[in-house]
Amino acid sequence: MALEMAHQLRAAGEEVALVAVFDSFPPDPRASPPAIDGGLLRRIKQIGALVLTGIVPDEGKGHYLRFYRQGMFLQRRHRGAPWDGRTLVLVARDDPDSAGRSRWSGHLTGQWSMHEVPGNHNGMLHEPNVAAVAELVTAELDAVAGIGSGG
C-alpha cells in the first residue's frame, strides 16, 4: 500500500522523499501469506486476541475482521509498479514470515535499505523494540534532510 500511495502522490505532482515500509509483504502474490482460514474457530481466536489486547474494542470486532479480510484479498491480487524512490524497509526479526517480508529487491529500483528490527510483526512498535525502529527511521529522515552529512 505504501508504494502505491507513493506512486499516486508523485503522479499528482507531490514530492515523495522517502517511503518507509514496516514489516510488510512486497506486492507479489507469490510472496504473500496464504489465504486466511475461513473457519469460525480461527476468526474467534483472532478477534478475541485483538479485543484482549485493547487494539479493537469489542463493538468494533466485526468491522475490523471485514477490513482485515479486504486488505488480505487486495494484497494477494495487487500488481504494483516498481518504485524508484528512496525506501527504508524494516523487517521484524522474530516473525516467522520474515523471509517473505524481505523479498523487496524486485520492487525497489531506487536507493533503498533493509534492516531487521527486534520483535515480531505486532511487537516491533512497542517498547522496548520501538526504540530501534525510531533510531532507524530518524537516521533515514536525517539523511533525506541532509542533517549530519555535512551538507
Image (spheres, rainbow, N blue to C red):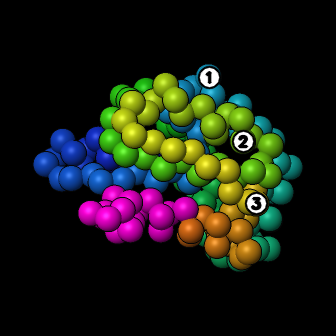
Residue 53 seen by the camera: yes
Tag count:
3
Image coords of residue 46 (percent x, y) = 77, 56
Image coords of residue 39 (percent x, y) = 81, 41
Dividing the picture into quarters, in which one does residue 118 lie? bottom right
Give the residue number, with chain letter if any, for mark 1: 30
Residue 145 in the magenta stretch? The answer is: yes
Image coords of residue 69 (percent x, y) = 60, 45
The numbered mark at residue 119 is 3
Between the C-alphas of marks 3 and 1, the distance is: 25 Å
Question: Is 42 located above or below residue 64 in the figure?
Answer: above
Q: Say left or right for 95 vs 150.
A: right
Residue 77 seen by the camera: no
Q: In the image, which residues are magenta?
A: 136-151
Q: Say left or right for 120 vs 32.
A: right
Identity of the residue drawn at 57% across and 45% down: 114
The numbered mark at residue 98 is 2
Q: Amino acid at mark 3?
A: Gly
Identity of the residue drawn at 71% across and 31% down: 34
Q: Amino acid at mark 1?
A: Arg
